Amino acid sequence: MELVAKRGKVEYEIVIETANACVGSARNGNSLIIELTGRDGTVTGPIQLNEIGDENFSRGNIDGFLKSAVDVGLPILVRLELRDIEGKNPLGVRRVKVWYRGRKVVFPVHDWVENELNVATGEAVPYHKVHNPHVMAVLKREVKYAREVLRWVPRPGPTDSKANLPRFVDVHMVSEIPLIFRPTEQWTLSLEHNPVHANVAKAVDLLKMTKAELNSLESYHVLYKVFEEPGKRSEFLDRWRSDEEYGRQQLNGIAPMALERCSNIPETSQISDVHVKTLLGGKTLTGEMKAGKVYMTDFTTIIRDVKRNKQQQGQQMYCPDSICLYHVNCSGDLFPVAIQLVPGDPDTIFTPENSELDWLLAKMYHKVAFGCVHEWYHHFLLTHGVMEPVAVAMFRSLPRSHPIYKLMKPHLQTITVINVFGRADLLASGSGANSAMALGGDETSRETFKTFDMNDLNFPELMKKRGVTNTKTGLKYLRSFAYLILGLNDPKLLPKFYFRDDATRLWEIIEHFAATVIRHYYPSDEDIVADRFLQDMMEDLATDGLGWEDEKHRKGLPYPLRTVDQLILLCTSVIFTSSVHHSAVNFPQYDQYKYIPNSPLAMRLPPHKKGEATMERIMNSLPDMPMSLAAVATTSSLSSYAPDEILLLGDYPVKLFVEKKAKAAMRTFRRQLDKYRADVKKRNNEVPYPYEWLLPEKIAASISI
């Protein structure tokens, strides 16, 4: 029990640093109470810092107070409380500093005070190293409260739309989202005004004024000009029809992870030497596959059982279960050499030796499958979908003073807010995204989540694999990073794969940072096993978050957590996925999809057969005006960076760590990113088509859009 001190009084200097994040008006206007607890559990009793209506605690302010209170020594805990509030405005607090007899103690809060908040001193301490019983009691109350506020969405039945998906926090609108998930209210409010709907309305109004029609391939250029500055034009649009550009976009475009090395032609395809031998310079497919020069994007099974969407007027949309073979030529460039649009139908096999329009239309159809799998699998499921339960489990299980909380919070705080919007505005039936795409978000995500394994996010391990069979399902791992699974890690065999090179380097930098911090707080495996908070987080994630339907394997999660290396791998995977992976598959979207013929997301006619392609057939197949507007507006909105206050990788303006070792690790992290940036820019200056999407200044630290 807390003991009210019966000692003499002493003067405490108290400083409250307010975050630039108040809800409501810029001035808080509330009365803030603080109570200090000493090492022996004695408390000062409530100390009122200001009167209601005083102009204290404005956004970003630093307010200082000299208060006489009973002497409890240098405090180890503070309790903050908002009192007597009408029209309560929660207060965002960055830090509390307390001076006692010339000594200072800092309490890093970085949270919202809604009613009452208890905060321990700034040192990051695992569960088993918290020796003060008063501090432990506060930490346990904090976790108990978090579990009451952050509830998992109820477990769905087998026919529920939420079945076969990662679970998430039980909120459905912005007003229900706990404030812990909102770094600033400005950012949250900026998302409430649906940018997709606003962009569509903007485009419709402008196009009405110009009376634009889609009657040629060139006419599609007018759509994206609505969202760009006059005169701006992406260089690749001048060569979009070329096979070289098609291969470049596969390697270094929106979803390079869809590519895999081809060691055998899948049974679903009838592509053979007859179709490609001339294109391979007289060499055989078997020989070139053995030489590591044949690659593929194969969608013949991954979306086979996914129902296709319909247009808003009820007409069917089309997306083929297609496969494309690529070949690395003597110059090291990746070229498409064959596409089969319908498994089992050799009349839908096309190569560059067919008519120009047959081949062009085949490439467009394959891009539909590519785009839908990118959006709902590589983008939504493998970043948004699997990272939200990690965030929920962490915030439910770890107190804010925990070292893993401090390490992971900058990378997980924003995911729940953005997913609440995404589930309503993107995944839901009838959403703008589903009116533009041939495959539905919910169904595609459920189908691909069936074989998801946490090891799919283990970048370096996947680089070593060669067609490994998933012992859990008997199926090959779905291609979350398939280029790593089937051997795209050799730059001699597959040069100019800048995404692979940059992502590998970033993984190593992130891993070094995470390992340095974690080994400081967990010197041995015994420390991992002894940390009850950490073990509770893993149990929550494995049994309620990601692995709730997979009782035997728990989606490959290390549960229970037993070693330091397991924790390093988990944290590295989460930071990498939330930053590097998400940025690579999110921010290039508009560039990839803005010109509809380059990368359509749906077709209005079923796949053609040899000899059927004409320009009229192409125009009748491509998306019409409503579908095209929805696609361009959606990808334009999703490709936008969040407001300035959302962090980039390596930025830590919120000072969660106070220990010298952890702060030194952050400085080293930034230096390594600076060196990486310089190396990438040097390379980009030496290549004809630079890859810039993974420059540190373009990598958001968390999933915030």
Image (cartoon, helix red, strand yellow):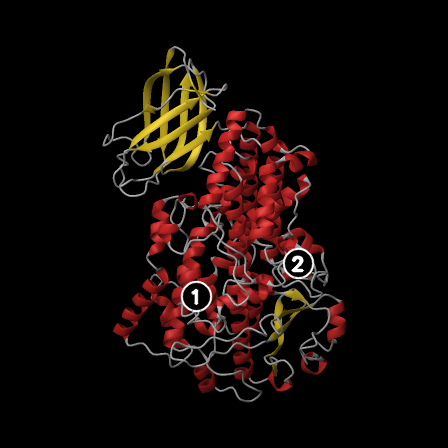
Q: Quadrant of residue 427?
A: bottom left
Identify which residue is drawn at 51% across, 52% down: 388
Front residue of this view, candidates 90 and 327:
90
Is 680 on the left or on the right of 101, as rendered? right
Front residue of this view, candidates 385 and 663:
385
**Which residue type does callout 1 highlight?**
Ala
Report helix, strand or loop for mark 2.
Answer: helix
- Give x and y (percent) for residue 346: 64, 85
Report helix, strand or loop for mark 1.
Answer: loop
- Give x and y (percent) for residue 661: 58, 29
Identify which residue is drawn at 71% across, 55% down: 464
- Disc 2 crowd rating (10 Å Cα; few below 14, some 14-19, many 20+) is many
Of all residues, the one furthest to the front in this rendering is: 1
Front residue of this view, candidates 657 and 144:
144
Mark yes or no: residue 328 visible: no
Is 343 on the left or on the right of 431, as rendered? right
Mark yes or no: residue 10 visible: yes
Q: Quadrant of residue 356?
A: bottom right
- Give x and y (percent) for residue 678: 54, 45
- Residue receiving disc 2: 484
